[in-house]
Image (cartoon, rainbow, N blue to C red):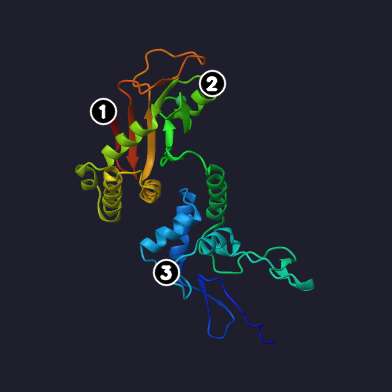
Amino acid sequence: MPEKKKISAAPSWLGLSEDRQSFLFIPERAHVVRRIFELAIGGMGSYAIANYLDERKVPTFTQTTKWDHTTIDYMLRNRATYGEYQPKSFASGHKKGIPNGPPVSGYYPAVIDQETFERAQVARQQNLANRGRKGNDLANIFAGLTTCGYCGNEIVLHRVSNVQVLACTQVVDGNGCTRTAWTYRDFEATVFAFLIHPALSQRFRGEQRSTLLELAERVAKCLTAQKPYFATRVEIAILLKQTVTHLALYSAAVIESPRLPSAQISKDVRGRFLEIRLWDGPVDKYLSVL
Ligand SMILES: [Zn+2]
């Protein structure tokens, strides 16, 4: 068998075998890369992620002591994270090389899957688009988790007379449903009150209990912070995705009569409640405090 060509370099999160013929998967680094992608999907930009890693004293993959936002950015755009290799040509003096031939999948050991990669690309675009907007808006930490209790459609962040609200997509699109909405801040406070209740974690064991305790700790930190605690809110969003399996909003309380699609949207109707389920536990009904 002819001798295999030696590999000259590996992505920073991978190692090389001693004979330089194969890549080595380094679990601790893979864990950090996954975290970086999660944070990006949660809405954090590369500067914020670098600060976040430095604050938590996460070692870099090189000799440097601090994380650099360009390293984070490069990683988030690098398809090698899910194993893809793009052959390049360095002919005619191209420093970075130009793509030469189709990409090869499964070339590197994957540290994330392609779906995670694509989700991070969407989040990065949104993040760039949102830059420069007024800082008073809160990012929806329940994105993708909430449904309408009446019609089952997705609940999205919307604005009613310049207030951030959560509303059913049917309401936003003018198709009817209840013509009600739940003020974002009030909804978040209601879910937070539910999550920090000491009796909640008692119902679970092992890893689920420790996840809930961690979540409650972050929520408490967020509630006592003077300013909106961005990094902590992203962490809460990540933990919520691991925990919540059902979160339905009943923003019109118990409806008595259907409303016309043209009716005005009423906010924070008395008696509004939510239904929440954690993993395969019981479904809790939780009333917002009026
Ligand atoms: Zn609805």
Q: Earlier in the sequence, mark 2 or mark 3?
A: 3
Q: Is residue 214 left or right of residue 19?
A: left
Which amino acid type is marked by label 3? Glu
Q: Is residue 178 left or right of residue 124?
A: left
Q: Earlier in the sequence, mark 3 or mark 1?
A: 3
Q: Quadrant of the C terminus?
A: top left
Which amino acid type is marked by label 1? Val
Quadrant assignment, res 96: bottom right
Front-lying residue, 115 or 129: 129
Quadrant assignment, res 167: top left
- In the image, is residue 5 above or below residue 229? below
Q: Quadrant of the N terminus?
A: bottom right
Q: Badge 2 local density, few (<14 within 10 Å), some, or many (20+)?
A: few
Quadrant assignment, res 224: top left
**Total label count?**
3
Q: How far separated are the C-alphas under marks 2 and 1?
A: 28 Å
User: Please, what secondary structure does the residue beneath circle 2 have?
Assistant: loop
- In the image, is residue 110 above or below residue 271? below
Q: Badge 3 local density, few (<14 within 10 Å), some, or many (20+)?
A: few
- Residue labelled 3 has its Cβ within 8 Å of some atom of ligand 1: no
The residue wearing badge 2 is: 174
The residue wearing badge 1 is: 289
Q: Badge 1 local density, few (<14 within 10 Å), some, or many (20+)?
A: few
Horizontal and vertical percent position of residue 34: 46, 60
